[in-house]
């Protein structure tokens, strides 16, 4: 079964909703799985249209791309926040806003590119 982008959008909305509700165990587990796999999966789909590898290598590449995506994003928000004048650039609100906004942009790019093909 191939994971579709609209399934990821549903999980994206569910993760944000659970973050707002602050449910103890479910929030941490779902957020960890979502933020460690979904950004990399979306970037991987933008770079490579059809996978030439098996699912374990796809999962590993997705995990690595997600970690790189989050680290570079946090590095950028730290440097840009200090230059813009934000007192606490690495607060929970700023981090979650940056990551969720970038994932939403990646979702939209995936939908636009997949619909144009």
Image (cartoon, rainbow, N blue to C red):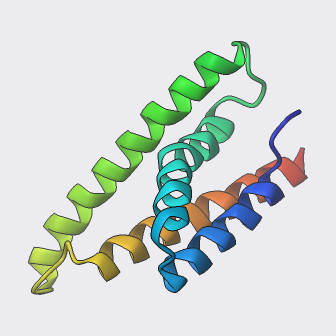
* 78 lies above or below 84: above
Residue 79 lies, with reference to residue 72, above or below; the image says below
Along the line of sight, the residue nearer the viewer: 117 or 111: 111
Q: Residue at x 71, y 13 (%)?
A: 54
| 113 sits to left or right of 65 | right
Q: Position of residue 73 (x, y in %)?
A: 33, 57
Q: Name the residue located 25 percent from the left edge and 67 percent from the top edge.
A: 77
**Residue 68: quadrant of the picture:** top left
Q: Residue at left 70%, top 62%?
A: 11
| Quadrant of the drawing holding the N terminus | top right
Residue at the far top in the pictured view: 53
The image quarter containing residue 112 is bottom right
Residue 100 placement (x, y as % from top left): 50, 69
Question: Looking at the rendering, in which quadrant would you find the C terminus?
Answer: top right
Number of callouts in the render?
0
x, y (%) of residue 25?
49, 63
Residue at 62%, 40% (x, y): give it: 41
Tell me where residue 17 appears, x and y as whole percent: 61, 80
Judge left or right: residue 33 versus residue 88: right
């Amino acid at each position: 079964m191939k994971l579709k982008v609209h399934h990821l959008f549903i999980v994206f909305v569910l993760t944000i909703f659970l973050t707002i509700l602050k449910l103890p165990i479910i929030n941490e587990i779902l957020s960890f799985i979502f933020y460690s796999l979904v950004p990399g999966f979306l970037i991987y789909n933008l770079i490579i249209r059809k996978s030439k590898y098996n699912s374990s290598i796809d999962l590993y590449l997705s995990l690595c791309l997600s970690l790189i995506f989050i680290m570079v994003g946090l590095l950028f928000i730290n440097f840009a926040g200090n230059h813009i004048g934000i007192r606490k650039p690495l607060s929970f609100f700023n981090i979650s806003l940056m990551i969720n906004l970038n994932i939403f942009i990646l979702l939209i790019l995936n939908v636009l590119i997949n619909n144009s093909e």
